Image: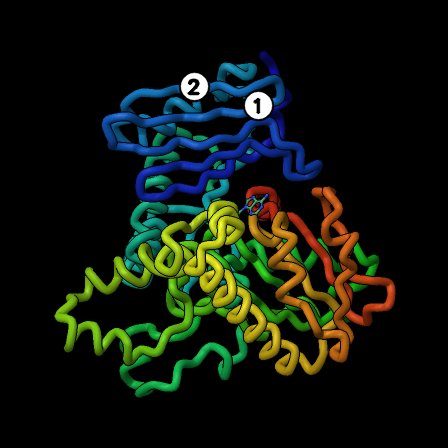
């Protein structure tokens, strides 16, 4: 087993009990290896490692993030030369919340780690795990520059009227309450690819990007700059997601607390992990949802309808905010693969210049593609996202 690792970036996405990793050539986009360490700290952990010549799996307890990363690095060494000589030029860390501090890819030092840790109040589920990932990786790979790429960075430029919640401004200021937006790396990457696909300048396009995965978010982008996005202070706002409710009347929380006696942690669990598609239908995976719909489940059908309704509501809002749109882009696991959502989200919009071509929509292609009809004034595209490549490029550009 050998692979060309010179000039690669190791991209790490550390979750509370998992590490996603990819070794990628930033220029060509070629992925040398990628995989997942999961169930860290549980009795039975698992590492899956895909590389150019096959797939390997390791099952057994993985004590902590360090042990997980060590397994990954040993494998990377197994690809060719010892790690010191393998030619990895940077480690790119996917970091969730950069607050008002981080607006662009940032070289990681002790101060940066400390600040990301302080920002955990805004992202208690994500930032602590990101911090562990950075600490462990910096200790294991001390000679290589580490770069943090923030999910919020692209949206730091949101106009004030889109970023501001209408609450007491002193309270908002004191607690950093504003709309930050997430999935920024994906929205930026996909909007740039869309312009390239069309052979047009990014600066001359109004785009609506729909990133539909387990988490889901929409953005309105004018000439490459975000003007609005559906996620807010946290990734809970906006579209209906696998397990998250998206937009909800804040009065619901007050009612659950006062009348149902639920405390903050219970409500947190309800809205983040037991809502969305899962709350409505029992399943969070979109393929499972569609199977239930096909079997005649009314709950699943309603879940699907609520999902599509919310999506259309955002499309309508962003069409007006942008004053017309040139491109609608679908991305993420659902957006890239699901024929029904793409069709239903844009059904009946001919008067707005949006016409999906049924044959193009259902064609089994997987790459970047157009699914709008030739008569459509608005281009409707499917652009697979590649956050790892975007992070690798950002890291390489910095070092
Ligand atoms: P994440 O947000 O975790 O990165 P993904 O972008 O991978 O998630 O999206 C996961 C979602 O995509 C799941 O709901 C999954 O069911 C859905 N998905 C993946 N492939 C398909 C497919 N072929 N058809 C429909 N849905 C799909």
Query: 218 and 7: which one is in front?
Result: 218
In the displayed structure, does residue 55 sit left or right of residue 255?
Answer: right
* Ligand 1 under 8 Å from disc 2 Cβ: no
Residue 55's spot in the image, x, y percent? 53, 20
For label 2, the SS is helix
> Where does label 2 land, which residue?
74
Location of residue 266 in the rendering, given as x and y in whole percent from the top left corner: 20, 61
Marked residue nearer the N-terminal end (2 or 1): 1
User: Residue 140, located in which quarter of the rendered image?
Assistant: top left
Q: Name which quarter of the figure residue 7 lies in.
A: top right
Question: Could you classify mark 2 by the number of other residues whose Cα lies within 10 Å: few (under 14), some (14-19), or many (20 or more)?
Answer: few
Q: Calculate the distance from the C-alpha at mark 2 to the C-alpha at mark 1.
A: 14 Å
Q: Residue at 51% of width from left, 70% of height from top? A: 310
State the quadrant of the N terminus: top right
Query: In the displayed structure, would residue 36 be above or below residue 192?
Result: above
Query: Residue at point 25% right, 31% down?
Result: 42
Out of 64 and 10, give the one closest to the viewer.
Answer: 64
Q: In the rendered image, which residue does mark 1 sit on?
A: 51
Q: Is residue 98 above or below residue 158?
A: above
């Amino acid at each position: 087993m050998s692979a060309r690792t010179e000039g690669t970036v190791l991209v790490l996405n550390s979750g509370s009990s998992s590490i996603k990793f990819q070794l990628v050539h930033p220029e060509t986009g070629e992925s040398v290896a990628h995989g997942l360490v999961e169930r860290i700290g549980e009795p039975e952990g698992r590492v899956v490692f895909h590389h150019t010549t096959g797939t390997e799996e390791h099952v057994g307890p993985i004590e902590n993030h360090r042990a997980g990363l060590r397994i990954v690095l040993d494998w990377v060494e197994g690809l060719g030369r010892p790690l010191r000589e393998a030619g990895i030029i940077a480690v790119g860390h996917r970091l969730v919340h950069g607050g008002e501090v981080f607006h662009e890819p940032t070289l990681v030092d002790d101060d940066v780690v400390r600040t990301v840790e302080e920002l955990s109040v805004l992202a208690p589920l994500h930032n602590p795990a990101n911090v562990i990932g950075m600490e462990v990786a910096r200790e294991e790979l001390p000679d290589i520059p580490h770069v943090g790429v923030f999910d919020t960075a692209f949206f730091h430029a949101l106009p004030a009227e889109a970023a501001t919640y209408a609450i007491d401004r002193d309270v908002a200021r004191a607690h950093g309450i504003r709309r930050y937006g997430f999935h920024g790396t994906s929205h930026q990457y996909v909007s740039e690819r869309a312009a390239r696909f069309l052979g047009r300048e990014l600066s001359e396009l109004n785009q609506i990007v729909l990133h539909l995965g387990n988490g889901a978010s929409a953005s309105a982008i004018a000439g490459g700059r975000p003007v609005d996005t559906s996620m807010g202070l946290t990734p809970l706002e906006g579209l209906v997601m696998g397990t998250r409710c998206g937009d909800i009347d804040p009065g619901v929380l007050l009612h659950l607390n006062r009348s149902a006696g639920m405390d903050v942690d219970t409500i947190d669990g309800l809205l983040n992990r037991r809502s969305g598609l899962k709350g409505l239908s029992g399943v969070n995976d979109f393929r499972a949802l569609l199977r239930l719909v096909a079997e005649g489940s009314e709950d699943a059908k309603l879940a699907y309808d609520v999902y599509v309704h919310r999506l259309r509501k955002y499309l309508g809002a962003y069409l007006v905010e942008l004053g017309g749109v040139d491109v609608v882009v679908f991305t993420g696991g659902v957006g890239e693969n699901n024929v029904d959502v793409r069709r239903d989200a844009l059904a009946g919009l001919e008067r707005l210049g949006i016409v999906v071509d049924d044959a193009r929509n259902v064609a089994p292609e997987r790459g970047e593609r157009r699914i709008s009809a030739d008569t459509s004034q608005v281009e409707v595209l499917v652009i697979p996202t590649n956050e790892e490549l975007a992070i690798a490029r950002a890291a390489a550009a910095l070092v």
